[in-house]
Amino acid sequence: MQYLSTRGNAPQKSFTQILLGGLMEDGGLALPVEYPKISAAELSAMRGMNYRELAFAVLSKFADDIPASDLKALIDKTYTAAVYCNGRPDSNAEDITPLREIEPGLFLQELSNGPTLAFKDMAMQMLGNLFEYALAKTGEHLNIVGATSGDTGSSAEYAMRGKKGVKVFMLSPYGKMSAFQTAQMFSLQDPNIFNLAVRGVFDDAQDIVKGISNDLEFKTAQRIGTVNSINWARVVAQVVYYFKGYFAATKSNDQEVAFSVPSGNFGNICAGHIARMMGLPIRRLILATNENNVLDEFFRTGVYRPRGSAETHQTSSPSMDISKASNFERFVYDLVGRDPAVVRELWSEVDKGGAFDLSKTPYFLRIADYAFTSGSSSHADRIATIRRVWQQYGVMIDTHTADGLKVGLENREAGVPLIVLETALPAKFEETIVEALGEKPWRPKAYENIEALPQRSTVVDVNVEQVKAFVVANS
Ligand SMILES: *Cc1c(COP(=O)(O)O)cnc(C)c1O
């Protein structure tokens, strides 16, 4: 399988060639030259597969330059009950992403039972093993530099800890993460993990990372890499659980389902789009946003208007506080008939801080052909949803999943199973759970006393040179 750029001006590459990279040379995102199609016979064979077998069936179509036996070994090492064991006491960890039917035809798919209790572990754990494998082949090493406000950073650290050839330098705003998130990251004692607490806010940390990325000489000399959500391997690893959820919710392959997806950077739902393009019978992809409703606005009106940080609300589903969806360009490339000239034109506005409007173009009508629909949710909606689901079903859900459930139910169709993707466990968002339910959320066993563990971090100023010096000294 070869990969092209959504902007059309970069040479095609193989899976392992794009594995360690970010943007393509022309600023576009990598996509396969065509989506592999799953035949009816293949789909029938897949129905009986466990998660690892499904992962191999899907990923071997995209990562065909990795020898099959190697890919299989990497998958078998990643998707184990021991790694995805943090679910509710009655969840079956062997299922990796267990499906919980909370009322007939309404399901939660548990994607957040991995080490950091958020769905990002689904792909990031695989990425850690892929990176280690690829680096060992070439004898190279990689210094991952990133900024986090919580979820992505911890997911990356737990995926890369102890991996040969990889070091992680993760910047976070000093004193601004929750006690739980801080403990999760700073209690890691692995020598290849470095937590840098920046005396500033998240945007300051992000600016330092940008400053480092823009220094091409430094970047090349120090072998700087990223694990951000535009990474293709992350997107494609997420395709697998759509298959798993589909088979678990249906009895035969002539049934269709709907997925409701709490969305921010459009990475999760992009994987759903790809699963559907491969032939998985998905009737609806329901995109849920919080108050930061840039994507909902696009699917309703055809206007895509990313916002700056000043216009981005801080909400109680913080991992969706995103106003510029980094994976959205992948979907738009398909929507405009895979014409890179159109994408270049649209993003010439976006990259300048502008917007585009497809409402008066034929593309807008095609959104329905791609099965997308959308809605948004507010803090009051989250509180009400968390409370109702707890009272009605005895199931405690987190704030992001609540956004997905609220919008999913608004778009539910009779007779179509609705699968709401659970993207985090409530333990990560204790404050809002207490506000909704008057009690603290349950915690997975491994995290019961995490705040009491010894912590390790280095405080730095908002100063690119200081961070660069730290990387050089420790790489
Ligand atoms: C990252 C994240 C999201 C958003 O996923 P995208 O792939 O960025 O759309 C939703 N919920 C949680 C808990 C997350 O960590």
Image (cartoon, rainbow, N blue to C red):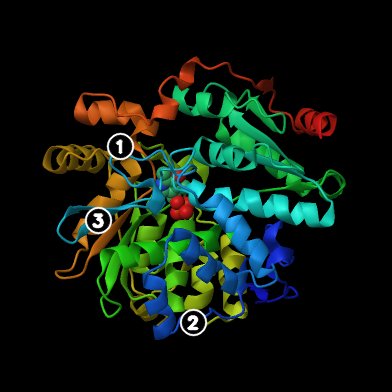
Residue at (24, 62) in percent of width and height: 418
Figure quadrant of the N terminus: bottom right
Q: Image quadrant of residue 204? A: top right
Kindly report the distance in space between the C-alpha atoms of the residues bearing marks 2 and 1: 37 Å
Amino acid under disc 2: Lys
Instruction: Find disc 1 in the rendering and name its residue.
Output: 89
Residue at (69, 42) in percent of width and height: 163
Amino acid under disc 3: Phe
Instruction: Find disc 3 in the rendering and name its residue.
Output: 107
From the viewer's perspective, tell me whether residue 461 is left or right of residue 45: right
Residue at (57, 78) in percent of width and height: 342
Q: In the rendered structure, which disc, 3 or 1, sits on the residue that comes first in sequence?
A: 1
From the viewer's perspective, tell me whether residue 460 is left or right of residue 428: right
Residue 116, x across and y down, in percent: 48, 37
Instruction: Find disc 2 in the rendering and name its residue.
Output: 37
Q: Image quadrant of residue 382? A: top left
Residue 130: which numbered mark, if any?
none
Q: In the rendered structure, which disc, 2 or 1, sits on the residue that comes first in sequence?
A: 2
Residue 370, x across and y down, in percent: 38, 76
**Depth check, front residue: 463 or 319:** 319
Question: In this rendering, which labeled residue sits more in front, label 3 or label 1?
Answer: 1
Kindly report the distance in space between the C-alpha atoms of the residues bearing marks 2 and 3: 26 Å
